[in-house]
């Protein structure tokens, strides 16, 4: 029977992060993936490694560490970093107050608070006057659908991680790991199920009230302008914990409640990222349910595009593609890390921050399992 130090079930970013952390220690690693390739949350997001605005404490610390790992991995694996930095544009005075307060905290260190003239200069394509903006130099963005396969290839080639695609984990009995293609022996197992928590641990899923969040996203044809970095705006300030914790967020939330009730109802906030071909990846929305449906709403897409048009003249841009993303949410956040049996750990990110924090989480888990 083949033998490994670690078996990882799931080849999304969380699974690959654990594989990297283990392989970097010289451990023998096997990754099982039930699909022919990573096909769920990890390849359907912005590829946006977000630092500024993350909740203070463990989440921000993990994001900072994960950003550093992304820098190392991208250079080694030939993964293109399409954008660096992020700009949060304030369309309302209350939003600018939030940014000003954030900039005064330790989390705002290294960020630049921009007045209206400076913000317009940084975003010359903006068609609506802004009250100002916050520029963060910390973020980076990869194309998720390209980066995740490239990361897997690099792990196989550089770190000799074994991959078994179209192979589903069936169970663990002691050191024996049974899967749809046979069985292997392993000293430890990490299950990275994404939103499919109930499929591996139904009692855990029930206990933490695991649900799914569905996102709607689009790709638009290249406009005639280039973005200075990933762009966000007012609605993001009440969704990201680091911003939402500022005292001025109360007044912003009240004004948004009056002016953007539909957007808030559908969890809409604006993120705009630009690829090397100039196309824009735009989103997103948030709908929560026990089992997220596969259907997209044109009305919700219109709300997202409305937020984009509040900043930029994109009336004539064509929608090149639409898709839904899914990630798990639960009463336990920002992640679940649960021991299902001795040396068998289930790990999933329940806050939508997998791309931003997974590498650090992988290092933590492997450190706990292997000392």
Image (cartoon, rainbow, N blue to C red):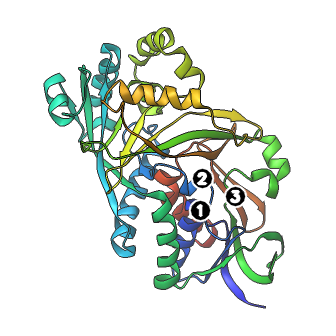
Q: Earlier in the sequence, mark 3 or mark 1?
A: 1
Q: Is residue 274 positioned above or below 131 on the image? A: below
Q: Earlier in the sequence, mark 3 or mark 2?
A: 2
* Secondary structure type for disc 3: loop
Please say if the residues under marks 1 and 2 sit with CB atoms less than 8 Å apart: yes
Residue tagged 3: 193
Front residue of 26/273: it is: 273
- How crowded is the residue under tag 2: few (<14 C-alpha within 10 Å), some, or many (20+)? many
Q: What residue appears at the point 75 percent right and 52 percent down from the top-left corner?
A: 197
Give residue 140's position: percent from left, percent from top. Answer: 34, 53
- Count numbered badges in the picture: 3
Q: Earlier in the sequence, mark 1 or mark 2?
A: 1
Give residue 172's position: percent from left, percent from top. Answer: 82, 71
* Secondary structure type for disc 1: loop
Instruction: Give the CA separation, mark 1 to mark 2.
Output: 7 Å
Q: Is residue 259 positioned above or below 168 on the image? A: above
Front residue of 343/22: it is: 22
Residue tagged 1: 12
Left or right: 247, with 355 as reference point: left
Q: What residue appears at the point 58 percent right and 26 percent down from the top-left corner?
A: 299
**Residue 181 makes an appearance in the image:** yes
**Residue 24 makes an appearance in the image:** no
The tag on residue 41 is 2
């Amino acid at each position: 029977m083949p033998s490994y130090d670690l078996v990882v079930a799931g080849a999304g970013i969380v699974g690959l992060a654990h594989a990297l952390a283990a392989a970097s220690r010289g451990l023998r690693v096997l990754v099982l993936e039930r699909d022919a390739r990573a096909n769920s949350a990890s390849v359907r997001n912005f590829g946006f490694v977000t630092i500024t605005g993350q909740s203070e404490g463990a989440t921000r610390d993990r994001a900072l560490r994960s950003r550093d790992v992304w820098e190392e991995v991208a250079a080694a694996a030939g993964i293109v970093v399409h954008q660096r930095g992020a700009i949060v544009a304030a369309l309302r005075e209350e939003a600018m107050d939030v940014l000003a307060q954030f900039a005064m905290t330790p989390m705002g260190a290294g960020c630049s608070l921009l007045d209206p003239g400076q913000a317009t200069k940084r975003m010359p394509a903006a068609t609506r006057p802004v009250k100002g903006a916050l520029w963060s130099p910390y973020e980076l963005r990869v194309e998720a659908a390209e980066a995740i396969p490239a990361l897997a290839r690099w792990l196989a080639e550089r770190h000799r991680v074994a991959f078994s695609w179209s192979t589903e984990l069936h169970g663990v009995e002691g050191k024996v790991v049974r899967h749809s293609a046979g069985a292997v022996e392993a000293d430890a197992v990490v299950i990275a199920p994404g939103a499919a928590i109930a499929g591996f641990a139904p009692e855990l899923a029930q206990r933490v009230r695991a649900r799914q969040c569905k996102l709607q996203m689009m790709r638009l044809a290249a406009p005639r302008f280039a973005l200075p970095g990933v762009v966000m705006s007012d609605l993001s300030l009440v969704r990201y914990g680091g911003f939402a914790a500022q005292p001025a967020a109360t007044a912003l939330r009240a004004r948004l409640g009056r002016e953007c009730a539909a957007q808030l109802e559908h969890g809409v906030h604006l993120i705009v990222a630009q690829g090397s071909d100039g196309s824009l990846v735009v989103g997103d929305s948030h709908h929560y349910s026990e089992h997220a449906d596969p259907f997209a709403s044109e009305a919700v897409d219109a709300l997202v595009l409305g937020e984009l048009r509040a900043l930029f003249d994109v009336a004539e841009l064509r929608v090149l593609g639409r898709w839904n993303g899914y990630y798990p949410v639960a009463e336990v956040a920002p992640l679940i890390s649960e021991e299902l049996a001795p040396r068998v750990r289930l790990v999933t990110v329940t806050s939508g921050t997998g791309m931003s924090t997974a590498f650090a989480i992988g290092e933590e888990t492997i450190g706990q399992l292997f000392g």
